[in-house]
Image (cartoon, rainbow, N blue to C red):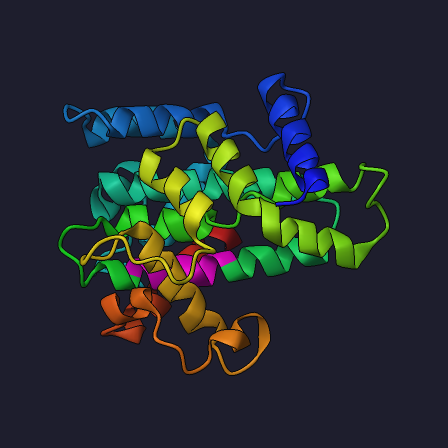
């Protein structure tokens, strides 16, 4: 890493530490839902009381519960029914996912944001499907890892838009963003008090050749999902074409329909 990249990273770390960089934050309802569902004594009724405070999230969970991806007979008409159908872990994941996506809406470049969200949802769905073939990994945690792996690009771009030495130089901004976003993403997820494995995903997902364990971890899932989504015949991963990638060797997409089903659920969540 060059001296000026180290300097930019130091500035961002300082601004995060001193709350001078405006970061997307999780709404209180999402923070409380994550805390509640982390408690083994949490019940659907207690979760219902908390989520019901947010009418928008309630409406979106109802739509997901009635989506074709989750449909199971009778239509769901109450939040309690939706929570029961979806399950606590999925509700936790969906509320977190929705909160993060809502927090991104402040991004000024709406077209770029749409591309960012679309790519994140696809990688998230693929991670969920890949994790279903791994007994030691949680598919919901994998889905969140896929959604969050590039999250560092948002505050980094915000910072670069106001950094005199690179402002207006789109190509240089893109290069810096690609090089630094893993570190910034890890800082942001630490700031949000997210689990260590998700912080690791943000920090290491660009290390395509990594091979730390025989069994895949969440970083491997994200690497494999990115390569499946973007491909290696052209584009950002073209230099990897024909190479053996450890993550791809460990992670097999056994049923692509599962990824499409998950993606449909995420789209239902956003379109309510």
In depth, the one of 84 and 92 nearer the eye is 92
- The residue drawn where x is 84% and y is 45% is 167
For the point 61% across and 45% down, the residue is 1
In the image, taking residue 177 as reference, residue 97 lies left or right, namely left
Q: Position of residue 102 (x, y in %)?
A: 56, 41
Most extreme residue toward the top, as rendered?
18
Q: Residue at x 61, y 54 (%)?
A: 178
Magenta: main secondary structure equals helix
Residue 128 drawn at (x, y percent): 30, 58
Q: Is residue 170 magenta?
A: no
Residue 106 higher or lower than 20, as above or below: below
Q: Along the line of sight, which residue is nearer the eye, 262 or 59?
A: 262
- In the rendered image, the vertical position of residue 224 relative to residue 48, given as above or below: below
When asked about the image quadrant of residue 214, the answer is: bottom left
Image position of 177 (left or right of 189): right
> What residue is drawn where x is 28% and y is 45%?
90
> Is residue 271 at least partly visible in the picture?
yes
Q: Please tell me whether residue 125 belongs to the stretch shown in magenta.
A: yes
Give residue 151's position: percent from left, percent from top.
53, 45
- Magenta span covers which residues? 120-128
Q: Is residue 78 something that shows in the picture?
A: no
Q: How many marks?
A: 0
In front: 133, or 14? 14
Give coordinates of residue 196: x percent, y percent: 33, 34
Quadrant of the rendered image containing residue 16: top right
């Amino acid at each position: 890493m060059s001296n000026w990249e180290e300097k930019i990273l130091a500035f961002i770390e300082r601004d995060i530490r001193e709350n001078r960089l405006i970061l997307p934050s999780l709404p209180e309802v999402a923070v409380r839902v994550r805390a509640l569902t982390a408690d083994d004594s949490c019940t659907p009724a207690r979760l219902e009381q908390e989520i019901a405070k947010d009418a928008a999230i309630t409406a979106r969970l109802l739509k997901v519960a009635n989506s074709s991806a989750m449909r199971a007979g009778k239509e769901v008409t109450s939040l309690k029914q939706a929570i029961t159908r979806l399950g606590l872990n999925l509700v936790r994941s969906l509320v977190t996912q929705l909160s993060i996506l809502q927090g991104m809406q402040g991004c000024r470049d709406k077209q770029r944001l749409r591309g960012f969200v679309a790519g994140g949802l696809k990688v998230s769905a693929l991670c969920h499907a890949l994790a279903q073939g791994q007994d030691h990994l949680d598919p919901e945690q994998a889905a969140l890892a896929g959604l969050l792996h590039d999250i560092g690009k948002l505050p980094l771009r915000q910072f670069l838009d106001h950094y005199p030495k690179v402002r207006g130089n789109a190509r240089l901004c893109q290069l810096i963003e690609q090089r630094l976003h893993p570190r910034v993403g890890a800082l942001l997820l630490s700031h949000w008090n997210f689990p260590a494995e998700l912080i690791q995903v943000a920090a290491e997902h660009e290390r395509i050749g990594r091979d730390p364990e025989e069994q895949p971890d969440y970083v491997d899932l994200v690497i494999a999902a990115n390569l499946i989504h973007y491909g290696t015949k052209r584009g950002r991963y073209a230099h990897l074409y024909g190479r053996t990638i450890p993550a791809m060797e460990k992670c097999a997409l056994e049923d692509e329909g599962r990824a499409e089903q998950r993606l449909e659920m995420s789209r239902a969540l956003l379109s309510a």
